Amino acid sequence: MDVRPGPDPGRAAPEHSGAYRTTALSLALYSGVLLAWTAYGIAQGDGNVWDFLEGLFNPGAAPTTQILGPYEWAFTVGFLVIAGLALARRRVARSAALLSGWVLIAVSLREGVGLLDATYRDLYGHDPLGGWVLTTRGLGLVVALVVLCAMAPATERRRGGHPSAPGADGPETWSRPETWWRRQSQICGVLFLLMCLARIGWLVADLTTPEGDVGHYLRNAVDGSVLGTLDLAAPSAFATLGSVLALLVLGVLALRGRREVRGALLVFAALELYITVRIVVSLTVTDFFNRSFETPQGALSLATTAYALAAMTSVVVLATGRGFGPYGGMRTEGFRAAAVGRSGGCRGL
């Protein structure tokens, strides 16, 4: 009787190991560059490392404006985590890496549009850090193309019905975890789409005010020359529209029960959760909570923040799949429980 475990459903096939290693090294390299910029910003600021660490979660605690922003800090950590998962050849890293690649492509396209402006191009020659900023942008584009080209073809058929697992009696053995994951995926999709609708609603409300300028807002999102400075931190317009698009695309894919999107769901929900925690800390230190119900808009803003906190936490928990294997399949203990009857004997062996 062969009781050896079957292939790990959470690991990519050996023929894709080169793509996963290439992705891991590329994202780790870019993360190292972002960490170098972070260290430079700390050295140039008036505070120390502890002040910076406090500023990671308290927007009002940073003594000076950092070169990178909270989205860049979050993606730096995300890139390192994805690199580690890819190095371990975990299949969950694939969709997360593809998401990272598309984010870097979007950043590069925005910068490319900005470089069409002659005045903005001259900034790179006059700014002492212009060459380093341009090199960072170029490296981001190269990393994005390498990751997308390496991971896009690294697909493989599901191994959910692999008969080599102990106690695998047929389709019935795998139908339950598949159904559970599909339900979890659909819940994540609904949470993402509701968050997307809420964000669109606030965006429309802000842009339809007398002070709102739709043209300038959209241009700021897609044109790096609008601010007139060399800035590695993403502007709010780019971050907001990018998050809306990511929530929409990932939400639709998750609602369809796409198993391979789990890594992207986990990474993006964790990023949104970090940004929401920063907002909550800011609301706390500014005493906004005590004044939030003075106006309907304040109460609605607080409700949206509370929903974002709960929804993104839920997606992180669901996408982690605590009751499942590393890629949505039942853990080995699940197979043993399915294979062992009440009397302790093995069924189907």
Image: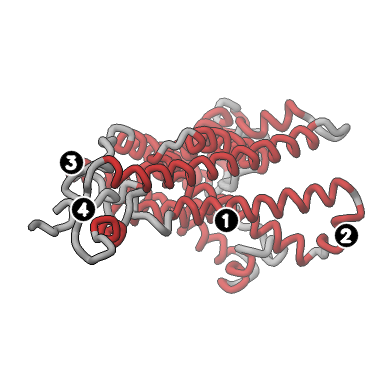
CB-based contact (under 8 Å), mark 2 and mark 1: no
Residue at the far right in the pictured view: 294
Image side of residue 201 versus residue 252, left or right: right
Query: Which comes before the other along the chain, label 2 or label 1?
Result: 2
Q: Which residue is mark 1?
A: 313
Q: Amino acid at mark 2?
A: Arg
Q: How far is the residue under mark 3 from the one under mark 4?
A: 28 Å
Q: Which residue is mark 4?
A: 167
**The disc label shown at residue 291, or none:** 2
Tell me if residue 32 can be seen: no
Circle 4 residues within 10 Å: few <14, some 14–19, many ≥20: many
Judge by depth and name the residue closer to the eye, 30 or 178: 178
Percent position (x, y) of residue 33?
43, 53
Q: Amino acid at mark 4?
A: Gly
Percent position (x, y) of residue 73?
53, 55
CB-based contact (under 8 Å), mark 2 and mark 3: no
- Secondary element at image label 3: helix
Q: How far is the residue under mark 2 from the one under mark 3?
A: 58 Å
Q: How far is the residue under mark 2 from the one under mark 4?
A: 59 Å
Q: Quadrant of the N terminus?
A: bottom left
CB-based contact (under 8 Å), mark 1 and mark 3: no
Judge by depth and name the residue closer to the eye, 112 or 205: 205
Looking at the rendered image, the disc whose residue lies closer to the viewer, 1 or 4, is 4
Q: Quadrant of residue 223?
A: top right
CB-based contact (under 8 Å), mark 3 and mark 4: no
Judge by depth and name the residue closer to the eye, 296 or 332: 332
Percent position (x, y) of residue 323?
40, 58
Q: Amino acid at mark 3?
A: Glu
Q: Which residue is mark 3?
A: 15
- Secondary element at image label 1: helix
Q: How far is the residue under mark 2 from the one under mark 1?
A: 26 Å
